[in-house]
Amino acid sequence: MRRESFAGVIKVRAMRTRGWIIPAAVFAAASVAAGSSAQPTPPRGPGEAPSEPVVVELFTAQGCAGCPEANARIEALAEEPGVIALTYAVDYWDYLGWEDTFARPEFAQRQRAYRRPLKLRAVGTPQVVIDGRRQVPGAQEAALKAAVEEEAARRVFPPEIEFRETGDRVGVGSGRAPAGGAEVVAVVYRPGLQTVEIESGDNRGQTVRQVNVVRSVRSLGAWTGRPSLYALPAGLGPDEAVAVLVQARADRRILNGAVLPPH
């Protein structure tokens, strides 16, 4: 991976985060020079959108009898401004008689990586992880909404995320790196709703609805607090978006996220 200073290099287009469009501009050299200190997010005025999205990750399975209700909660939440909602299909329920059509082993691995930081005895479905900081049972609507609202109100020191005009690279600005460092993660997903007819297993005869289904997840490289450029996954389809997350390695909290929509 090649890294470069932002100054004079990145040209960016409008970027969607928190459900609205942020007019993006080239980072000024003074604000992104290596070693520059992070600045606190300024207070926002009445009606003004916050600058960091809340990342909501649902771990679910088509063969899980208790998952359709949680899927519906996330489907509704995905329409809320300021939320990046992502659905990961796991494969460990396939033995019940239905092989999940969206599942990949690495999605279950991502879920298991949250177990120790969140102090969980085990993982299961449906599970919702919010900003990598907390988990909520996906079917509990009131708890889910309260957790999202609390995370939206959290003031942090996020590194800025900008996409190149060409859509092949993403820049992450300077900021305060967490203990243990951080990584930049690219989550490729299909925006919108998908439905699957379940032919066997516990959900036999049902039509399962899932929103923003993840197709792949990969690390783009380390982020140490200095401004850096990262190559985005190549060969994206016309129906695929990329959510870029800056995530702490040790405690798995998500520092910031942004979405490059299909193009």
Image (spheres, rainbow, N blue to C red):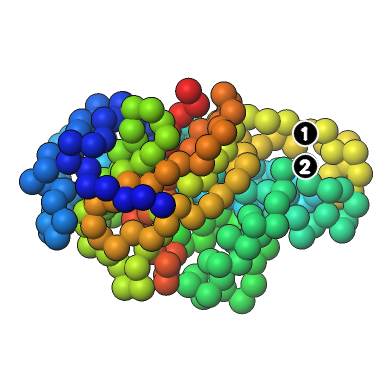
In the rendered image, the vertical position of residue 241 relative to residue 55, given as above or below: above
Please give the name of the residue rendered at 49% of the width and 55% of the height, measured from the top-left corner: 219
Real-space Cα separation, disc 1 to disc 2, in angstroms: 8 Å
Residue 5 placement, left or right of 211? left
Give the image quarter of residue 22.
Answer: top left
User: Looking at the picture, how far across and down is residue 157, in whole percent?
Assistant: 22, 56
Q: Is residue 209 left or right of residue 80?
A: right
Kind of residue at badge 2: Thr
Secondary structure under badge 1? Answer: strand
Residue occupying the point 24% across, 52% down = 227
Q: Position of residue 68 (x, y in %)?
A: 71, 43
Q: Is residue 28 visible?
A: yes
Q: Nearer the viewer, residue 202 or 224?
A: 224
The answer to which quarter of the image holds residue 171 is: top left
* Picture residue at 36% right of the left edge, 73% below the top: 180
Label 1 belongs to which residue? 196
Q: Position of residue 51 (x, y in %)?
A: 26, 41
Question: At x 70% / y 35%, what residue is drawn?
Answer: 209
Q: Residue most toward the left?
A: 30
* Residue for badge 2: 101
Q: Is residue 222 above or below residue 10?
A: below
Q: Amino acid at mark 1?
A: Val
Earlier sequence position, callout 1 versus callout 2: 2
